[in-house]
Image (cartoon, rainbow, N blue to C red):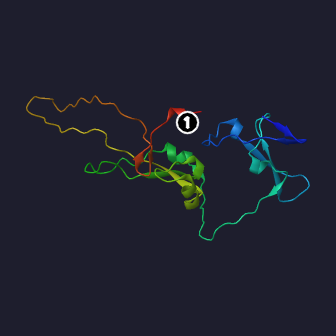
Amino acid sequence: MEIVCCGCTNVPDAKPKPLEPSDVNQQVEIVPRERDRGCFVAKSVDPDGFPPSFLRRKGWTVTMHTPRHYRLGEASGLNSSLRASLPGFNFPLSHDCSQAVFVGKWYCPFMLIKEGGVKLKDQMKKCMFYEISLEQRWEKIFDSINENVEGKNKGAVFVDAFVQREVVFVGGSEAIWDERNRE
């Protein structure tokens, strides 16, 4: 909605809402200004949309400063060959799982991670990127003692159990899939 007053066009900002990466109204394209080096303008991805007021100005500059303690290593993403190969199955029966095998690493921007009990502002100050690693391992899901009493069971065990094929853990806790965030 545009408001024209005294020959000037004013576009009021929409009320802030949580980031929704798939919402075309929240997407902007930042492009360099043709004449000025280091100067940029923002355009809304939606042809009928407008960028927020702080990006709407006619040209602004961007400078970069990396703190000394800020180090990001190489993150080459998912290694398909490691992901396709299964972890070793030679762990002792006394252990509940095999050794975890690393199969991929990448960095995720803070705005896509919701850290429990931490305000977004504090989360941003703490770290702009979260290091995400993918590991896979064998894990015991069912066990039974073979009570082979004379003629009973004859060494056979019947298992009727629901088994999850994959489980995702974040920070040691099982991740919960939210259908509202699915695209």
In what quadrant of the picture does the C terminus appear?
Answer: top right
What residue appears at the point 60 percent right and 53 percent down from the top-left corner? 76
Residue 104, placed above or below residue 160: below
Residue 100 placement (x, y as % from top left): 41, 52
Figure quadrant of residue 160: top left
Q: Quadrant of residue 140?
A: top left
Quadrant location, the N terminus:
top right
The extreme left residue here reads 150
Q: Position of residue 113 (x, y in %)?
A: 54, 48
Report the number of numbered marks.
Answer: 1
Which residue, given by chain and number where applicable, does mark 1 sit on?
181
Residue 64 appears left or right of 110: right
Q: Position of residue 123 (x, y in %)?
A: 54, 56
Image-based side of 143 in relation to 82, left or right: left
Q: Nearer the viewer, residue 53 or 130?
A: 53
Residue 110 percent location from the top left of the image: 58, 52
Residue ID at (51%, 52%):
133
Please name whichever residue, 178 or 2, is drawn nearer the observer in this view of the structure. Answer: 2
Question: Which amino acid lies under the numbered mark 1 shown in the image of this protein?
Answer: Asn
- Residue 109 appearing in the image: no
Q: Nearer the viewer, residue 13 or 137?
A: 13
Q: Is residue 23 above or below residue 93?
A: above
- Specify few, some or many for label 1: CA neighbours under 10 Å numbering under 14, 14-19, or 20 or more: few
Determine the secondary structure under disc 1.
helix
**Relative to 179, residue 81 above or below:** below
Residue at x 43%, y 38% (from the top left corner)? 166
- In the displayed structure image, the side of residue 4 where residue 122 appears, left or right: left
